[in-house]
Amino acid sequence: MTDSQVYARRLLPKKHRYPMYYPEPLDNLPLEYRRRGVGIGDVGIIKPDGSFEFAFNIFIPWAESDREINCFGVPDGFVPMQLGRQPVASNQNKHAEGSVIMSNCEKSKDASGSIGVGDGFAPSAPAGTIGFDITSSSSETAVLTVPDGALGEDYYNKKAIRKFAITHALSWYEFINVELGREAPNGSLYVVTGCDRSTAWGIATVEKYSSSGSLSLQFTAIKGQLSASYSCSWSTTPGAVSRHSIAAEDFALGPDVKQPQNQCLFVRGYKVMVREGLMALQSPSELVAAESITDHSKSDSLLRQKDRSFPGTASGSKSWLSRIAGYQGGGKSNRESADGWSAEKELDPHVGAYHPLDSINSYLLDQTQAQIAITHESDWWALSPDETTPNESEIISRLATHYALSIESGGAFLTPIPNERSNAQSNDGSAIVLETGN
């Protein structure tokens, strides 16, 4: 299992949203984007290595320039989504200075000082240092340190983004895969509705260490004398892999630019999957014909009929969806671990980074005739009552207790069931299907 897999596997259950193993913006992106980092409205892919591969932003018009945020262009016929009034909830202190998010380890008793207090103005000042001792019998550990704290931002009207994504999902996939040639697997498209960003961070992972052995990690952060940037470093015993942020001057963000909060620690948003076969449609007439299928007045007509195939579905070829999350009617693949992670699947170039939402989206398409399945980062939390990542069978079996399947404009998504109806489900135990209109 790769370091990025260990990191996501261990911190995802903390429910801060999806943990990014590479928080820093990619070097090839325009200066304007690098100063901002991953932001609300970004459409892209969470790569298996834990980075976010940006494609375009739904709120920003295209200025036909490779120097602006939408440097790669925009989908054909793109019209930006309009921002609402006071659209973003912002929490400057989402993660306090010196925050530590970790699994299966404890702060060591002999740590020298508190993280984030190091100050380069005084040569004799101690560095802000914190240590960790691995104490768990688990074979994996992940640690995130945030010396300067982190900003949290979330778009208020997530429903508007969901509707916009359902309407344009096919053209977005076409833009990313045909125009940009990214070869994004079906189900990997991610629309950002919120994120946590910082100026500095440290990440460490440990895999397959002996619980009887001694293993320690020590993170140091020193604030620079001439800028607000932190200089970060790790000291570890063999067996640990670490990463850390670099100072602003090393980012080439421009002269006299202080380190901005452009390092995306956690991202939250919608994952979007389309019905198999629609991706292969080429002509506008085929697309129109397929889209008209979802224009039904009753949601019952959207329930899949087992003896009929959906128009446009490819036959005689290996299912693309089966390569995404390995959905097998609620079961798990032979080589899948107890919590749903499969190193083999993440090594497949046709499969994106593992996410619990992949199983839910596959299930939504399996249970309805909707073209699009879309679920939000927070949808799987109710399906995981403790700090574990549920496997596919657990996810599917718990859906009916917490959610109804809703359909709107050809897109299937989850609607929370009110507490008084938490035990409501259909006669066969499957989730209830609701119609929410077109």
Image (cartoon, rainbow, N blue to C red):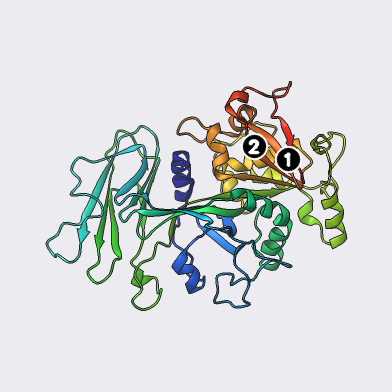
Dot placed on the residue nearer the N-terminal end, 2 or 1: 2
Whole-percent x, y for residue 324 in the image: 65, 46
Residue on which disc 1 sits: 436
Whole-percent x, y for residue 347 in the image: 57, 50
Q: Is residue 33 left or right of residue 312?
A: left
Q: Which mark is residue 88?
A: none
Other-residue count near label 1 (Cα within 10 Å), few / some / many at <14 / 14–19 / ≥20: some
Residue on which disc 2 sits: 415
Whole-percent x, y for residue 201 in the image: 35, 56
Residue 349: which quarter of the image? bottom right
Q: Callout 2, which amino acid?
A: Thr
For label 1, the SS is loop
Give above or below for 344 relative to 63: above
Other-residue count near label 2 (Cα within 10 Å), few / some / many at <14 / 14–19 / ≥20: some
Q: Residue at x 31, y 56 (%)?
A: 148
Give above or below for 201 relative to 367: below
Q: Is residue 384 left or right of residue 411?
A: left
Q: In this rendering, which labeled residue sits more in front, label 2 or label 1?
A: 1
Residue 356 visible at all: yes
Whole-percent x, y for residue 6 in the image: 45, 45
**Closest to the observer, 76 or 350:** 76
Residue 390 visible at all: no
Q: Is residue 388 left or right of residue 298?
A: left
Q: Residue at x 46, y 68 (%)?
A: 34
Residue placed farthest to the left in the image?
Answer: 124
Marks 2,1: beta carbons within 8 A: yes
For label 2, the SS is strand
Mark pair 2, 1: CA separation: 10 Å
Residue placed farthest to the front in the image?
Answer: 85
Q: Residue at x 29, y 66 (%)?
A: 228
